[in-house]
């Protein structure tokens, strides 16, 4: 009989198995001050991550640019910002375990 690997995961008082992270503060943050669409550097600053991270997520089709400028620069909308904020929250919370 094969035992489930879930039994081997220690469950403390606070862990990803007992508590869902509160990501509502990142999703519902004040985005009215931003002028969309955003350049990649503006998106990185708003999502508190690096331009390199955004480029990697774009290459992996995790986020998508809303439009491009005449010179080919990617511009990102509110959807990309919210998606990045959720990803950054989940990654941060998983590293705290």
Image (spheres, rainbow, N blue to C red):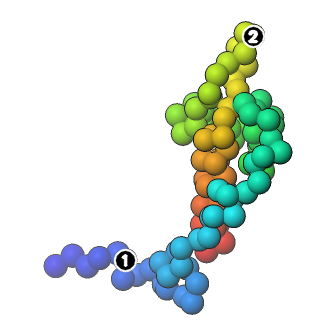
Answer with left or right where residue 74 lies relative to residue 4: right
**First along the sequence among labels 1 and 2:** 1
- Residue situated furthest top in the rendering: 70
**Does residue 91 appear in this view?**
no
Q: Nearer the viewer, mark 1 or mark 2?
A: 2
Question: Disc 1 marks which residue?
Answer: 6
Quadrant of the rendered structure where residue 33 is? top right
At label 1, counting other C-alpha atoms closer than 10 Å, the crowd grade (few under 14, some 14-19, many 20 or more) is few
How many numbered markers are drawn? 2
Q: Which residue shows up at 78% across the image and 46% down it?
A: 32
Marks 1/2 in contact by CB < 8 Å: the verdict is no
Instruction: Look at the image and tell me in which quarter the N terminus lies.
Output: bottom left
Residue at image x 50%, y 82%? 18
Residues 36 and 60: in front is: 36
Considering the numbered disc 2 on the image, is that residue within a helix, a strand or a loop? loop
Q: Is residue 50 above or below residue 92?
A: above
Looking at the picture, how far across and down is residue 91, in whole percent? 62, 59
- SS of the residue at dot 1? helix
Badge 2: residue crowd in 10 Å (few <14, some 14–19, many ≥20) = few
Determine the residue positioned at 67% across, 58% down.
Answer: 28
State the residue lying farthest toward the bottom.
Answer: 13
Q: Position of residue 35 (x, y in %)?
A: 79, 35
Extreme-front residue of the structure: 32
Q: Which quadrant would the C terminus be assigned to in this image? A: bottom right
Question: Residue 17's spot in the image, x, y percent?
Answer: 47, 78
Residue nearest the observer in this picture, 87 or 4 = 87
In the image, residue 31 above or below residue 28? above
Q: Is residue 4 left or right of residue 55?
A: left
Residue 45 lies in quadrant: top right
C-alpha gap between disc 1 and disc 2: 51 Å
Q: Which mark is residue 71?
A: 2
Q: Which mark is residue 51?
A: none
């Amino acid at each position: 009989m094969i035992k489930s690997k879930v039994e081997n995961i220690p469950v403390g008082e606070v862990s990803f198995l007992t508590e869902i992270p509160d990501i509502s503060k990142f999703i519902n943050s004040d985005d009215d001050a931003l002028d969309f669409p955003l350049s990649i550097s503006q998106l990185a600053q708003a999502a508190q991550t690096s331009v390199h991270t955004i480029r990697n997520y774009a290459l992996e089709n995790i986020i998508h640019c809303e439009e491009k400028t005449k010179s080919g620069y990617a511009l990102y909308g509110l959807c990309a910002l919210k998606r990045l904020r959720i990803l950054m929250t989940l990654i941060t919370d998983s590293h705290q375990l």
